[in-house]
Image (spheres, coloured by chain):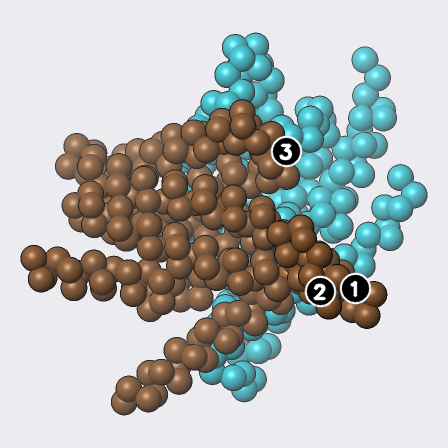
Chain colours: A brown, B cyan
Amino acid sequence: MNGSRTDSRKLIVEGLWHNNPIFRQVLGICSTLAVTNLVLNTVVMCVALIFTLSLSACTVSILRTLTPRNIRMMVETLIIAFYVIIVDVLLKAYWPEMSGNLGPYVGLIITNCIVMGRCEAYGNSNPPVRALMDGLFNALGYSFVLLIIATFREILGMGTFLGISMPYFGGPRWDKWIIMVMPPGAFFMLGIVTWVFRSIEIRMENKNK
Amino acid sequence: MNAGPEISQAFVVCVSAMFTQNILLTYFLGLCPFLGVSREVKTSMGLGLAVIFVLTSTCMLNWLTYHYVLVPLGLEFFRFILFIIIIAAFVQLVEMVLDRYSPFLYQKLGVFLPLITVNCAILGASLFMVIRDYSFIVTIGYGFGSGLGWFLAIIAMAGIRQKLANERIPQGLQGPGITLIIAGLMALAFMGFSGVLQGT
């Protein structure tokens, strides 16, 4: 019992920090970076990703003994696509504006490398519950970095947070950095966030020595 | 049917997909191989060429399937699965044909082809073309322009990174960090092209 508890703690720490999808593995930024100009869009996108990643890792793991090895990739893609279609259909039905805002990016979760990466690296060789945990915490580690980026971009670029005007940044004294809500801002923010987190990590490693 | 205005529209879409609406620098598609493979100009060139070819062809194939199969059957929500299957099958086919008939090209591009199936730029371009409701001719222009834009961006990045190899960069910024910041500067530069298409 004790063994499995340290195991899951290890999974959590790995997903959130040591093996964080964004600043360690640098995977899967494509489809989500584009929506980080508004916090709300990012939240919806991250929820979609958490749902897809954890459930598809779990499903891949359940089917792992039944899938022939040479068509494995194709089966994984289909499983991922299945969950993405569920998200897409739900969004279209209950929240059409959001579906319009996100455009093709919901569909692009299919080719998001982190989903495929986790299914392939972990789901494929581990039991379902652990694959689910691994997927969940990788997705959470991914989401928290993206939310940091989105928060900075929205506040600096538009002076709002979740659409609500912020005290200083929304006022006339703050000259809005329009560049932050445009594509270059996303690259800069992600570069800076990666830099900060990696530096913290390097420092922690040096201390441990 | 008068194709004249459509062809000129296709041209405009092609140029804008290359520069002002670059699929990589404005829509962040195909970022993973862009960060991973852009260390050398030579390999980037191979990958870039493969992307141009696959992107243009799959865009056309997907347009035909979408408008002649999915829309009449009312199965539009099924497009994610169908598009990805078409892309994967097409890439596999190209790989087999190249292997059989042109060992030279296979050696040059072969290793990059499997990577392309998971390149989000390919699926992204197909989804954009559906959302924006392009006609067939415009889709050809769009696919080609997007591919060419991706090619230009990765080559430029590889050139810059080769120069950077000997520079002293803070330890935490090495690798993806500096690459992303360069990509940001490149995105700024590409935004400068937006004046080109003002008149249309």
Give the residue at the far top of this rendering. B72
Where's residue A164, x and y in %? 67, 53
Q: Mark 3 belongs to which subunit?
A: A
Residue that label 1 marks: A171
Q: Mark 1 belongs to which subunit?
A: A
Depicted A119 relative to depicted A187: above or below: above
Do callouts 3 and 2 point to residues on the same chain? yes
Secondary structure state at the residue bearing disc 2: loop
Q: 10 Å neighbourhood of mark 3: few (<14), some, or many (≥20)?
A: few
Depicted A80 relative to depicted B151: above or below: above
Q: CA distance from mark 3 to mark 1?
A: 28 Å
**Label 2 with label 1: CB-CB less than 8 Å:** yes
* The image quarter in which residue A180 lies: bottom right
Q: CA distance from mark 2 to mark 1?
A: 7 Å
**Of residues A83 and B176, the one drawn nearer to the viewer in this rendering:** A83
Q: 10 Å neighbourhood of mark 2: few (<14), some, or many (≥20)?
A: few
> What is the three-letter code of the residue carrying label 2?
Pro
Where's residue B59, x and y in %? 59, 32
